[in-house]
């Protein structure tokens, strides 16, 4: 009678709804021994989720289910990784590398159809889980199975094969390096520093311990008000003083001066108010303050923690129109406390009830554009152990009558109202804040109140209440203790919000660290200079699909460490190059190290924007680059990136556009190249130029017909999807009306003007314009010196802006705002201008120069031409 298959034995041990997908016998590599295991891939039909069960068998083969003991369960989720590595020499073994968070397991398998089928099932389940929509899969079904984790299962010595003297260990339970491979030169090893970092990271648990710290996170949209009240009722309501304060403000200053030039006295006023209101039970030191227009973030820590704070950095991202205006966006600060990295993000997302898609877009813009460039390697928000996101996220209540919402809130029945909360709905759909958590809301909405009262908005708009002001978090070891609002503070139309967290921070035991570091160094000294790093790259010739303006394209590259210890890699710049890749290409990550048997997924994103389009249109640049992948202590690998760019009117010079009566798609590429080559120098004599480029005329005419009374024109950004449609409309030509909202058309106009190689006012006249900015007569003389097509565009657009100002009582625009915005467009800063103070002074002069032409008549120009 044949023995039952292990699959049948394991299935007999399972509960209802759980089934075995596949089972395979393997050898687990542990220290100096190889021990037999059975891996079982299980599916739970209720939650549609999978997990890997590791069984120890007391008999080979197992005859009864009692001879199988469950040793470990590894749920398959977003942080589950599985890699396959074949032995270097004769491919007689296959190694399965399983990792999840800090768990790392290495299994040896015999090559063959059974192994391929089992591994294929694992990858299939991983793909199913990665493509799943809705809330993350629930692995709680695995909790009903008893796992014997407290002690090592008893292993029959007959099934333990000791490693012989032909191998030695490199301070890791998973790394065994055969000496025969060393002799043959087939076993690679990383450079010294990479190995040290890897070994120390693997032993982090041995020299660190967990210590809990209290983190206070607060956010308040102050509606431009000065701090005329004390803040103790917001910042010092807890009995014990927190260890860290992260305090965010929005709408710090609503004056035009602050909005236009990022300059406000409110920064110092609110900083002082906060400093006075910190908990009296402790002494605090400011880590840093970062501000963009009305968004400000301040972080304080207890004085005793200051010596343990390192690698402090701050960054800002504006998500206003064309990425220029900083009235919306985010500010962030990061640092490392002991051995844990923390990041705080304060954001103010797009306003208005119906604009949840713009809020989603703002969130993604902040995530993709905010990087801490002062650090090497650069870090983005996601590259931190703990992230705390706070701010006026502006998500509203929809699909509910305001009066019904107020009635439910008055009786503290918040749940029915929260079911209509846009943030919760978008979060559940995984459109924003994927991986973030938010605590239970059991306080009244924080917006909108009549300032100075606890009464809901009584204006004509009668806005529905909303929980605009929120705090979310992401990372392990974070426990929210309280989530609350502070209605006693009434000077704004928002109520402040705070959350108190108990967060686990890894603290280094210096004595243990030095001892372990010394041991690693001693063992490593014996191996010095014996090995070289080695990796494989899955593709060294990246071929792009057709690339278009403003349409990102992503390609993936896999770097696999085929050695047995970590490899440090970095993309480095070539000789005479300013960067390691061209400006239309972004590589993430561009630097890092890979553990043995592991791989690193490299994301290459190609994005042609207003900075790079003009060079691709003119032929000055091509979609071709050679990347140099450098291995620390090893060789360089060369990777080519090639593609074809579909030229657009965005990025064409003004001189070329005026000689293009047809849409760019109908113009042969050779003629486009000739137009750009002869632009402004040798124009076509057989052709009469247009007074202004037709693309500018189309956009302005559309705004003239539909946008004169539109509020916040040129202040609110458009939607990216609509900008693509407008680009296609301009490039291809159409008898249909221009698609998209007037806000998108307005942004398209700005992008078109900013994408030219030189601005409307050439760089050669830039300094003269700034010098003449306070004198209208001198400014007119300079405009008269402009090449005729540029002069036409300048005066045409200024006339249109004057027409907009004639409707200022309806659209809310003013001359200073428009002058500042278009001053930065007409008088774009010459390349490599960096001094911030000089830049602010120059911005004011640019605004003054354009302001002259918004408040004075152009009749004398028009009469002459």
Image (cartoon, rainbow, N blue to C red):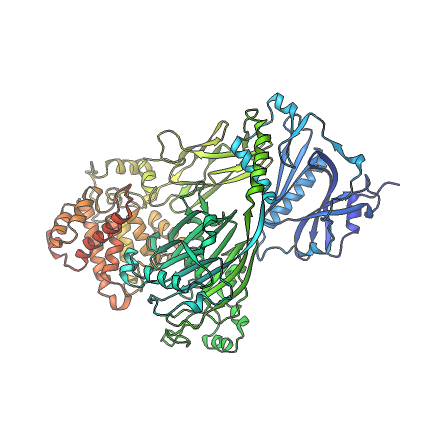
Most distant residue in the top direction: 183
How far across and down, in percent of the image, does residue 246 sit? 44, 58
| Left or right of 439 in this view: 705 | left
Q: Quadrant of residue 247?
A: bottom left
528, 474: nearer the viewer:
528
827 or 489, nearer to the observer? 489
Residue 320 position within the rendered picture, expressed as x and y whole percent measured from the top left: 35, 56
Tell me residue 566's x, y (percent).
56, 34
Q: Is residue 758 above or below residue 578?
A: below
User: Can the viewer see residue 693?
Assistant: no
Where's residue 97, x and y in %? 64, 39
| Residue located farthest toward the right when viewing the structure as drawn | 1
What residue is at 43 percent from the left and 45 percent from the top? 552
Asked if residue 646 lies left or right of residue 435, the reply is: left
Is residue 422 positioned above or below 513 on the image? below
Nearest to the observer: residue 709 or residue 780: 780
Residue at (69% x, 29% y) in the render: 92
């Amino acid at each position: 009678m044949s023995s039952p298959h292990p699959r049948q034995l394991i299935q007999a041990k399972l509960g209802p709804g759980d089934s075995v997908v596949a089972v395979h016998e393997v050898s687990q590599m542990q220290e100096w021994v190889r021990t037999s295991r059975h891996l079982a891939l299980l599916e739970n039909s209720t939650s549609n989720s999978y997990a890997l069960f590791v069984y120890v068998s007391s008999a080979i083969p197992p005859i009864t289910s009692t001879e199988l003991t469950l040793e470990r369960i590894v749920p398959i989720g977003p942080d589950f990784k599985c890699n396959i590595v074949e032995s270097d020499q004769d491919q007689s073994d296959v190694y399965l590398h399983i990792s999840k968070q800090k768990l790392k397991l290495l299994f040896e398998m015999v090559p063959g159809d059974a192994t391929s089928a089992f591994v294929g099932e694992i990858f299939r389940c991983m793909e199913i889980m990665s493509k799943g929509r809705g809330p993350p899969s629930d692995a709680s079904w695995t909790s009903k199975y008893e796992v014997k984790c407290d002690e090592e299962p008893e292993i029959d010595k007959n099934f333990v094969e000791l490693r012989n003297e032909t191998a030695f260990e490199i301070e890791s339970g998973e790394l065994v390096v055969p000496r025969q491979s060393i002799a043959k030169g087939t076993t690679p090893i990383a450079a010294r520093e990479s190995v040290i970092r890897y070994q120390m990271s693997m032993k982090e648990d041995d020299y660190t311990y967990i210590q809990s710290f209290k983190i206070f996170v607060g956010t308040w949209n102050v509606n431009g008000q000065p701090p005329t009240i004390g803040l103790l009722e917001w910042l010092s309501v807890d009995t014990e003083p927190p260890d860290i304060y992260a305090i965010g403000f929005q709408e710090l200053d609503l004056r035009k001066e602050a909005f236009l030039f990022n300059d406000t006295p409110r920064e110092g006023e609110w900083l002082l108010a906060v400093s006075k209101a910190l908990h009296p039970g402790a002494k605090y030191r400011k880590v840093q303050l970062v501000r963009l227009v009305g968004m400000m973030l301040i972080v304080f820590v207890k004085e005793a923690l200051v010596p343990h704070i390192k690698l402090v950095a701050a960054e800002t991202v504006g998500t206003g129109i064309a990425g220029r205006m900083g009235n919306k966006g985010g500010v962030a600060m990061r640092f490392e406390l002991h051995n844990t990295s923390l990041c705080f993000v304060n954001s103010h997302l797009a306003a208005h009830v119906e604009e949840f898609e713009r809020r989603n877009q703002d969130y993604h813009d902040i995530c993709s554009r905010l990087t801490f460039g002062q650090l090497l390697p650069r870090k983005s928000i996601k590259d931190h152990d703990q992230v705390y996101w706070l701010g006026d996220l502006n998500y509203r209540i929809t699909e509910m009558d305001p009066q019904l919402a107020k009635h439910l809130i008055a009786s503290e029945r918040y749940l029915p109202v929260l079911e209509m909360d846009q943030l919760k709905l978008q979060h559940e759909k995984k459109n924003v804040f994927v991986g973030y958590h938010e605590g239970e809301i059991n306080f009244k909405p924080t917006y909108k109140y009549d300032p100075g009262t606890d009464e809901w908005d009584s204006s004509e708009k009668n806005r529905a209440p909303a929980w605009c002001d929120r705090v979310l978090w992401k990372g392990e070891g974070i426990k929210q203790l309280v989530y609350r609002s502070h209605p006693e503070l009434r000077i704004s139309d928002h109520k402040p919000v705070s959350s108190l967290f108990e967060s686990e921070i890894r603290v280094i035991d210096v004595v243990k660290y030095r001892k372990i570091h010394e041991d690693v160094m001693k063992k490593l000294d014996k191996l010095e200079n014996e090995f070289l790093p080695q990796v494989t790259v899955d593709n060294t010739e990246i071929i792009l699909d057709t690339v278009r303006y403003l349409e990102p394209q992503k390609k993936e590259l896999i770097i696999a460490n085929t050695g047995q210890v970590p490899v440090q890699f970095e993309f480095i710049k070539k000789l005479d190059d300013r960067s390691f890749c061209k400006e239309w290409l972004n590589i993430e990550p561009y630097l890092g190290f890979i553990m043995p048997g592991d791989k690193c997924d490299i994301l290459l994103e190609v994005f042609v924007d207003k900075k790079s389009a003009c060079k691709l249109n003119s032929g000055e640049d091509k979609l071709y680059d050679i990347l140099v992948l450098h291995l620390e202590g090893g060789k360089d690998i060369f990777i080519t990136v090639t593609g074809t760019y579909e030229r657009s009117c965005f990025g064409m010079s003004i001189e070329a556009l005026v000689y293009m009566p047809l849409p760019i798609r109908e113009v042969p590429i050779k003629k486009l190249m000739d137009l750009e080559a002869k632009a402004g120098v040798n124009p076509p004599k057989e052709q009469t130029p247009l007074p202004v480029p037709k693309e500018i005329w189309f956009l302005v005419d559309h705004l003239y017909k539909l946008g004169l009374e539109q509020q916040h024109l040129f202040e609110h950004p458009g939607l990216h999807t609509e900008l693509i449609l407008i680009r296609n409309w301009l490039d291809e030509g159409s008898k249909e009306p221009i698609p998209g909202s007037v806000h998108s058309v307005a942004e398209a106009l700005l992008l078109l003007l900013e994408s030219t190689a030189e601005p409307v006012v050439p760089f050669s006249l830039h300094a003269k314009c700034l010098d003449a900015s306070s004198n209208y007569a001198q400014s007119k003389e300079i405009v008269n010196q402009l090449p005729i097509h540029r002069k036409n565009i300048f005066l045409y657009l200024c006339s249109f802006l004057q027409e907009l100002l004639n409707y200022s009582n309806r659209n809310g625009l003013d001359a200073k705002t428009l002058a500042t915005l278009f001053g930065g467009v007409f008088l774009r800063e010459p390349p490599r201008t960096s001094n911030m103070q000089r830049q602010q002074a120059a911005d004011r002069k640019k605004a003054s120069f354009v302001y002259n032409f918004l408040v004075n008549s152009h009749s004398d120009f028009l009469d002459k031409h």
